[in-house]
Image (cartoon, rainbow, N blue to C red):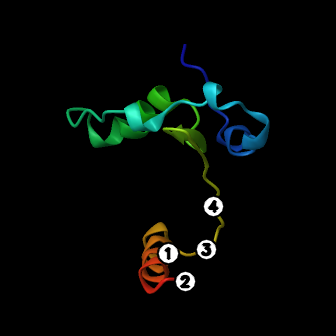
Amino acid sequence: MQEQIDLAELASVNIQKISKGELVDASNLHFDLQVPQKSRAAYLLNAIGNPYCFRVGELSVKLEFVEHGSSLQDVLLTFLQRKKSGL
C-alpha cells in the first residue's frame, strides 16, 4: 500500500530547524526522461523527499508559494535584470 503524502505538512517545515545534512542535495539529482510525464511528480517526490525543503550543494532552499503571486519565471527575470543593472 502506498503511503499518503501530506504536502501541507511538507510545506510547513521550518528549514532553520533542520541541519543541512538532513536535506537532500538536489544538485545530485538526475532526471530520467524515460519516466512518463504523468509519473514525474511522484518520481521527484521519491527522489527528493520534500519538494519544499532541500539543498543545492551547501545552500539550503525553502520554496514557498502564494496563491496569486508572480510566476517563477517573472521573479527570476526581475532578479536577473536587477543583478545585471547592479541593484
- Distance from the alpha carbon under mark 3 to that under mark 1: 15 Å
Q: Which residue is mark 1?
A: 79
Q: Mark yes or no: residue 14 visible.
A: no
Q: Crowdedness of circle 2 by 10 Å Cα count: few (<14), some, many (20+)?
A: few
- 36 displayed left or right of 41: left
Mark sitting on residue 14: none
- 61 displayed left or right of 80: right
- Distance from the alpha carbon under mark 2 to that under mark 4: 24 Å
- Distance from the alpha carbon under mark 2 to that under mark 3: 22 Å
Q: Which residue is mark 4?
A: 65
Tell which circle, 1 or 4, labels the residue nearer the N-terminal end. 4
> Which residue does the image show at 72% across and 42% down from the upper left?
15
**Up/down of 59 relative to 63, above or below:** above
Task: Confirm or deny contact between disc 3 and disc 4 (CB under 8 A).
Answer: yes
Q: Which residue is mark 3?
A: 69
- Distance from the alpha carbon under mark 3 to that under mark 4: 7 Å
The residue type indicated by label 2 comes to: Leu
Q: Position of residue 54 (x, y in %)?
A: 57, 38
Q: Which residue is mark 2?
A: 87
> Which residue does the image show at 31% across and 33% down from the upper left?
30
- Distance from the alpha carbon under mark 2 to that under mark 1: 9 Å
